Image (cartoon, rainbow, N blue to C red):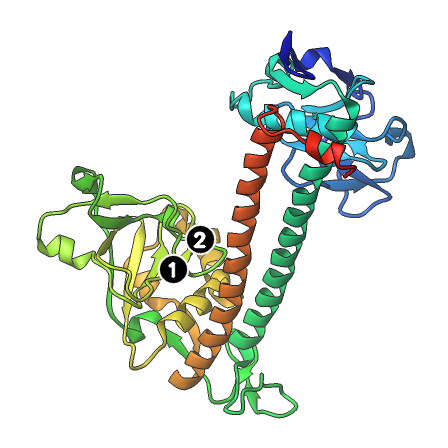
């Protein structure tokens, strides 16, 4: 049917061609870490592995749009590849549709059809009613605009990945070698080191225990559901902690309005409190920032109130988010502590303990890198929002690109 001037709307099945590659698909157990040819499947990772069998390579008819029958992930593949695992649909459009424009049509449809769990989504994708211009030139121009913002997203993701690698390496250096009074990372060539349970560390450092630097070690209690409210105090759960950094994640907040009691007072947080997940996924760390306001923890989190005259809270947070801290939680998992950590065990957790001033220097450096990454994530979120708005406008004809075409863009 006619949608608007120069546009039509049809189910995607009328404009897509599904390529049967089942005889060439490989299972995830056959993926290699290195190899001659990249493997593309329905997972969120663009290239999920490699393989060396040239007979399995899809190279004729490029490019293709790959659609995840279970995951709804979409990928635009313009290089020879091997299709991986069941559920990977390899698609092309009919000849009257621009290849890249078709990819964006499928991408939008994959979001709009909704999630049917592990059900096959391809049948729903084929029935999605797509709107598109009949002009191949207009299709190409729309794809070109969306490709520009995709490129910006890709570059921002690459910057974040690079900065995260730098921060990870820096954390390992700072948490085992520290920063001397001149602002330099120590080395054994210039400074005295000694053996410790965490390997070689500066001679002046100590090994501390959480219980020895804490004024309170406690955890939340059950029964808070009766205090849930639409507004009030923040109720912190494991989902508000993240392994990516020691800042709190606040995009999924529950509020409570508890009645005053000793139990409620015991589980309230203060600036600088260290939080550690103690059930299910052990060892996720967070530190309460300044000006956070009134908040409480649930039973899955340990709250360690630190002696701030002796230790810097954010340094302690980084120490337990780093390799040495996480290895302790890993060993506890292996020892059968998956069901949860008790508070005496939390008190025994160890960390490298430089002097208070050096702890502060280390925390300041790592905070700067964390903030840089946070800003890039904010930019990435902004770009993704812009892309979503552009796709809605350009792939429905709400905003036309004909003025650009008429101007010779």
Report the quarter where the C terminus lies.
Answer: top right
Is tag 1's residue or tag 2's residue first in the polypeptide sequence? Answer: 2
Secondary structure state at the residue bearing disc 2: loop
| Image position of 293 (left or right of 207) | left
Rendering coords of residue 384 (x, y %): 56, 42
Q: Residues within 10 Å of mark 2 (few under 14, many from 20)?
A: some
> Which residue is located at x 30 percent, y 57 percent?
302
| Quarter of the view holding residue 80 | top right
The residue depicted at 37 percent of the width and 50 percent of the height is: 250
Tell me: 284 left or right of 96.
Answer: left
Q: Position of residue 393 (x, y in %)?
A: 57, 30
State the quadrant of the N terminus.
top right
Q: Position of residue 403 (x, y in %)?
A: 69, 33
Q: Is residue 5 left or right of residue 345?
A: right
Q: Are marks 1 and 2 in contact (CB under 8 Å)?
A: yes
Nearer the observer, 263 or 389:
389
Front one among 208 and 178? 178
- Quarter-wise, where is residue 162 in the image? bottom right
- How far is mark 1 from mark 2, CA to CA? 7 Å
Q: Tell me which residue sits at (20%, 56%) in the image.
A: 267
The residue under the point 75% across, 33% down is 405
Q: Which residue is mark 1?
A: 286
Seen in the picture, residue 288 relative to 50 is either above or below; the reply is below
Label 2, on which residue?
Answer: 242
Q: Secondary structure at mark 1?
A: strand
Q: Which numbered marker is on residue 26?
A: none
Residue 241 is at least partly visible in this image: yes
Q: Where does the image place residue 294, in percent across and percent down from the top left? A: 21, 57
Nearer the observer, 370 or 196: 370
| Above or below: residue 80 compared with residue 271 | above
From where the camera sits, is residue 70 visible? no
């Amino acid at each position: 049917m006619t949608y608007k001037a120069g546009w039509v709307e049809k189910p995607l099945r009328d404009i897509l061609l599904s390529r049967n590659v089942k005889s060439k698909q490989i299972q995830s157990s056959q993926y290699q870490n290195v190899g001659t040819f990249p493997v593309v499947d329905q997972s969120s990772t663009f290239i999920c592995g490699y393989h060396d069998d040239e007979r399995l390579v899809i190279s004729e008819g490029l490019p293709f749009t790959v659609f995840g029958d279970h995951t709804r992930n979409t990928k635009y593949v313009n290089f020879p590849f091997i299709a991986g695992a069941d559920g990977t649909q390899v698609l092309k459009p009919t000849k009257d549709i621009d290849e890249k424009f078709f990819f964006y049509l499928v991408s939008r449809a994959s979001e709009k059809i909704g999630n049917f769990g592990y059900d096959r989504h391809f049948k729903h994708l084929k029935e999605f009613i797509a709107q598109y211009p009949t002009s191949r030139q207009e299709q190409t121009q729309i794809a070109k605009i969306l490709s520009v913002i995709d490129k910006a997203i890709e570059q921002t993701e690459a910057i974040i990945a690079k900065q995260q690698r730098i921060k990870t390496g820096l954390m390992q250096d700072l948490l085992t070698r520290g920063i001397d009074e001149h602002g330099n990372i120590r080395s054994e060539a210039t400074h005295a080191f000694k053996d410790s349970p965490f390997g070689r560390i500066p001679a002046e450092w100590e090994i501390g225990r959480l219980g020895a630097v804490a004024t309170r070690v406690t955890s939340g209690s059950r029964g808070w559901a009766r205090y849930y409210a639409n507004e009030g105090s923040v109720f912190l759960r494991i989902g508000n902690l993240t392994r990516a950094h020691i800042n709190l994640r606040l995009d999924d907040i529950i509020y409570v309005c508890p009645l005053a009691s000793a139990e409620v007072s015991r589980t309230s947080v203060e600036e600088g409190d260290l939080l550690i997940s103690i059930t299910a996924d052990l060892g996720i760390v967070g530190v309460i920032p300044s000006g956070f306001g009134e908040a409480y923890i649930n039973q899955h989190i340990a709250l360690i109130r630190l002696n701030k005259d002796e230790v810097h809270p954010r340094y302690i947070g980084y120490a337990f988010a780093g390799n040495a801290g996480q290895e302790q939680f890993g060993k506890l998992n292996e020892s059968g502590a998956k069901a949860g950590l008790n508070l005496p065990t939390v008190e025994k957790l160890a960390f490298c303990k430089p002097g208070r001033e050096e702890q502060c220097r280390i925390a300041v450096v790592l905070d700067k890198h964390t903030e840089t990454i946070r800003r890039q994530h904010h930019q990435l979120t902004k770009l993704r929002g812009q892309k979503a708005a552009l796709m809605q406008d350009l792939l429905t004809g709400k905003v036309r690109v004909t003025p650009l075409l008429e101007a010779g863009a």
